[in-house]
């Protein structure tokens, strides 16, 4: 009986952590647990969740991407002039930004696989390269006062629910089906679990990795559209911390840094946990330095619980 209780607690550690955090902050500040504040948390978590899903698709293959934030900056900057042009439908730059992200992801994947450079080194380099190109294109200029036809996707509601939350649900569902119901998804997990075995079984692992980078960076670039729409601005410095934030969400959500483990549900819950705790600390007027410390401790705790769950499942 005792072992069953322990197993249940470990397997549902993420949900229990979220509930505990919300209750603690609500106890000390009644304004925290209001409908308006919960809506704010979900709106913020929706964007972080999309970034997490972008990173998760790459981490599943046993890789990592430190350049997601720079991909967002460069993709957005490339088409910032078109965004300002009200004669062009806003859907056009949105699509082009997303496709640019996929293209940059393809380049990153090619460098990693064809030049056989470790993904940490590759994306560490492309992070600087993509950001540098963005700075060369616009410098410190901020493109602001974007048209309402572009901004609505990051600021408006549909049926009383923010559009960004709907987009998280839709994109999350698509990736969930991709991972669980398609051959590509199964091969992504297999490649991350054991790349050599996957290659010997006839899987073109390089193609799988490149595809994962393309999907992940396309989602990231589209998330950049949402950030630009919400901020009403596009600039070369956008997304400076997005890569590390997305990795943190993935680790908290149960992804393995070595690949082959993770999923949409855990990643989204990880994004909600991080956002809810940050929001609660802001309510409590906790300094940003201490918030960073708390997030680091949270990652360690989450990874520890995930390891214990793995041990239970292997028994």
Image: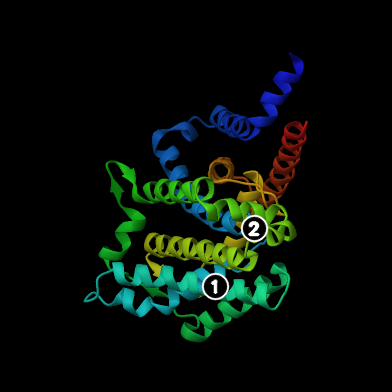
Q: Give the farthest residue toward the top.
A: 1
Q: Which residue is mark 2?
A: 61
Residue 123 vs residue 78: left or right? right
Residue 293 vs residue 46: left or right? right
Of helix, strand and loop, which one carries label 2?
loop
Of helix, strand and loop, which one carries label 1?
helix
First of labels 1, 2 by sequence position:
2
Q: Is residue 62 visible?
A: no
Q: Which residue is mark 1?
A: 106
Q: Residue at x 61, y 29 (%)?
A: 16
- Relative image position of residue 135 (x, y in whole percent): 53, 82
State how far apart marks 1 and 2 are (Cα).
15 Å
Residue 196 vs residue 95: left or right? right
Q: Quadrant of residue 133?
A: bottom right
Q: Residue at x 68, y 26 (%)?
A: 9
> Quadrant of the image for the N terminus?
top right
- Relative image position of residue 163 (x, y in whole percent): 34, 50
Q: Residue at x 71, y 39 (%)?
A: 306
Q: Is residue 4 visible?
A: yes
Q: Which of these two is toward me, 289 or 306?
A: 306
Category of crowding for the residue at label 2, using alpha-carbon neighbours closer than 10 angstroms: few (below 14), some (14–19), many (at least 20): many
Q: Residue at x 55, y 32 (%)?
A: 22
Category of crowding for the residue at label 1, using alpha-carbon neighbours closer than 10 angstroms: few (below 14), some (14–19), many (at least 20): many
Q: Quadrant of residue 107?
A: bottom right
- Relative image position of residue 225 (x, y in whole percent): 41, 64
Marker disc for residue 34: none
Tag 1 and tag 2, C-beta contact below 8 Å: no
**Image vertical order of residue 305 relative to residue 190, above or below:** above
**Image vertical order of residue 215 relative to residue 180, above or below:** below
Q: Quadrant of residue 79?
A: bottom left
Q: Which of these two is toward me, 41 or 212?
A: 212
- Relative image position of residue 297 (x, y in whole percent): 73, 45
């Amino acid at each position: 009986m005792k072992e069953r209780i322990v197993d249940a607690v470990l397997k549902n550690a993420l949900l229990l952590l979220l509930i505990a955090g919300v209750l603690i902050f609500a106890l000390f500040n009644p304004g925290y647990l209001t409908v308006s504040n919960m809506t704010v948390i979900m709106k913020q978590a929706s964007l972080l969740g999309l970034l997490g899903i972008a990173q998760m698709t790459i981490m599943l293959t046993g890789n990592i991407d430190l350049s997601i934030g720079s991909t967002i900056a460069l993709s957005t900057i490339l088409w910032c002039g078109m965004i300002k042009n009200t004669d062009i439908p806003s859907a056009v730059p949105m699509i082009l930004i997303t496709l640019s992200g996929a293209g940059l992801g393809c380049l990153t994947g090619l460098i990693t696989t064809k030049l056989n450079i470790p993904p940490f080194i590759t994306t560490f380099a492309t992070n600087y390269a993509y950001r540098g190109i963005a700075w060369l294109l616009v410098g410190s200029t901020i493109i602001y006062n974007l048209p309402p036809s572009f901004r609505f996707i990051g600021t408006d509601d549909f049926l009383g629910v923010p559009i960004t939350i709907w987009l998280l649900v839709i994109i999350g569902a698509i990736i969930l089906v991709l991972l669980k119901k398609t051959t590509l998804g199964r091969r992504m997990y297999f490649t991350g679990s054991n790349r050599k075995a996957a290659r010997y079984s006839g899987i073109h692992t390089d193609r799988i990795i490149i595809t994962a980078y393309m999907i992940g960076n396309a989602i990231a670039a589209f998330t950049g559209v949402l950030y630009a729409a919400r901020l009403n601005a596009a600039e070369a410095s956008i997304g400076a911390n997005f890569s590390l934030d997305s990795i943190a969400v993935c680790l908290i959500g149960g992804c393995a840094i070595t690949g082959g483990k993770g999923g949409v549900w855990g990643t989204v819950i990880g994004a909600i946990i991080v956002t809810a705790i940050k929001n609660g600390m802001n309510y409590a007027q906790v300094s940003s330095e201490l918030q960073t410390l708390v997030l680091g401790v949270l990652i360690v705790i989450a990874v520890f619980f995930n390891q214990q769950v793995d041990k239970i499942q292997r028994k």
